[in-house]
Image: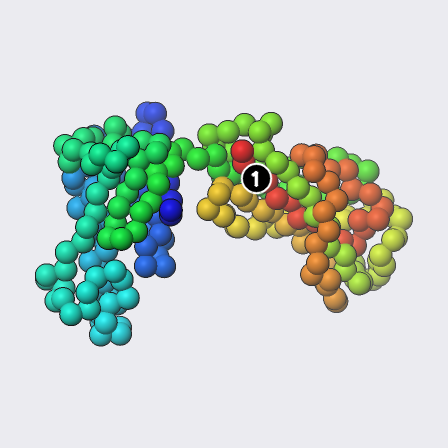
Amino acid sequence: MERVTVRCVEGDEFLTLSYVYGNKQNNMLRPKTETLEKSLDRIKANIIKLAKKGNKKTKKTKLDVASSQSNESIEVKCTLTKNGVELEKTELNKDAWVEGAVLQIQDRTYEVYKNLPKVLSLKLPSTLMVGCPVYPRVEVEFTQHKNCSFIWYQSKISQLSLGNKSLQDGASESSIDVAGAVPMDVDHPDGTLAAKSEPVAKIKAIECQWTEVCRDRVLIPTEKMLGSKLKLQCVPR
């Protein structure tokens, strides 16, 4: 069963519905006090719009609607059920889109997941130095830091040129920056986010294989990490 995620925060006027259909990510912002019927009608309209776009490009729709139908006659089945019972169209969005409900679009089914834990941002300091603890800045939603998994990875490079000084793997100068921080916008469906540090100097060659080095939130770089790239992954629980 596929997934439709719902973000509904107390105090907000709207809720967000997110799902994938026709290889397209759909994100809808709907009023909490809007009726379920209007939200389902909007979903149907989006499906028909996507079907029309497919017809224009290929003269045949790639969606789950008969290609012989004209755009005007396309009918989309869209219902929301709870425990096998279809919900009333007059239900308000805030009451209808609950954990465990099932959205049916044509022959596809989506289980409703509400307020899943998510990493909103993950950043590393601008400078990493041997012996100095690295405290990542992490912003999460619907969870706490103590419930998240932190995994650090190291990738070695063959040579790092820094100004007029060439630093080889295994160099012992602890005052040399290991890397500067460049956040990666990697937002997975499960809320996982990764941040990767990039070397501050020109890289001549890179080994792309990552090796796990730590599973704590805080990392203390060692001399063996000089001239390396570091990556931190945070998985919300």
Snapshot quadrant of residue 10: top left
Query: Which residue is at 22% across, 74% downward?
Result: 59
* Residue type, label 1: Val
Where does residue 77 sit, x and y in percent of width and height?
19, 50
Where does residue 30 sit, x and y in percent of width and height?
25, 39
Q: Secondary structure at mark 1?
A: strand
Query: Which residue is at 66% across, 41% downward?
Result: 151
Count of numbered badges drawn on the protein: 1
What is the image's colouring?
Answer: rainbow
Residue closest to the eye, 100 or 158: 100
Category of crowding for the residue at label 1, using alpha-carbon neighbours closer than 10 angstroms: few (below 14), some (14–19), many (at least 20)? some
Residue closest to the eye, 129 or 232: 232
Residue 67 lies left or right of residue 168; in this view the side is left
Q: Residue furthest top?
A: 11
Residue 42 lies left or right of residue 99; in this view the side is left
Quadrant assignment for the C terminus: top right
Decide: is 48 above or below 79. below
Decide: is 172 above or below 235. below
Snapshot quadrant of residue 175: top right
Residue 68 appears anywhere in the view: yes
Snapshot quadrant of residue 111: top left
Q: Residue furthest right?
A: 172
Residue 46 lies left or right of residue 209; in this view the side is left
Where does residue 71 sit, x and y in percent of width and height?
14, 64
Query: Which residue is at 35% across, 52% downward?
Result: 20
Q: Residue furthest left?
A: 73
Residue 6 appears anywhere in the view: no
Residue closest to the eye, 163 or 91: 91
* Residue wearing tag 1: 235
Query: Which residue is at 75% across, 44% downward?
Result: 213
Where does residue 231 sit, x and y in percent of width and height?
66, 48
